[in-house]
Amino acid sequence: MKNIYLTGVLLFITISSFSQSASSHILRAKKAYSRGNYVEASFESIKALRIKPKKKKPQEILSFSYELAQESITESIEDLKSLSTNFTGDITVSQRKRIVKLYKTLKKLDAEKL
């Protein structure tokens, strides 16, 4: 009898933590979107949808933030590429590293969305 009760309590805690987790990701996605951080908003929406796939709010946020995130990353890459056409030392190296990081973020975002 104690095992059934303990299993029920653990199941309830697990389910509660998942719903809280989805809600916290949705809240983070909303905040990120309102700050203009569309990449973070997209990732947080995806995390929420992995926990609760039928939730409407993260679907809405993702539908708006995903394309804006792609545009933002692409613009940043293009800006950095135009700045560092000639090798000028450490600044160019850091700019190139930033381009690679942004590109990897874009690819990760594409992979996560699938």
Image (tube, helix red, strand yellow):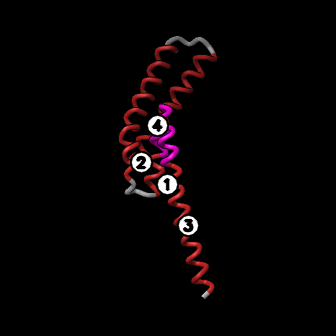
User: What residue is disc 2 on?
Assistant: 58
Give the spatial CA distance, label 3 vs label 4: 28 Å
Whether the residues at callouts 1 and 3 have beta carbons within 8 Å, the answer is no
Q: Look at the image and say whether residue 79 sits in the magenta stretch.
A: no
- Element at badge 1? helix
Q: Earlier in the sequence, mark 1 or mark 3?
A: 3
Q: Earlier in the sequence, mark 4 or mark 2?
A: 4
Q: Is residue 45 above or below residue 54?
A: above
Q: Three-letter amino acid code at disc 2?
A: Pro
* Residues shaded magenta: 26-44
Give the spatial CA distance, label 2 vs label 3: 21 Å
User: What residue is disc 1 on?
Assistant: 22
Residue at 53% across, 55% down: 21
- Element at badge 3? helix
User: What residue is disc 3 on?
Assistant: 14
Q: Three-letter amino acid code at disc 1?
A: Ala
Q: Earlier in the sequence, mark 1 or mark 4?
A: 1
Quadrant containing the N terminus is bottom right
User: What residue is disc 4 on?
Assistant: 33
The numbered dot on residue 101 is: none
Q: Three-letter amino acid code at disc 4?
A: Tyr
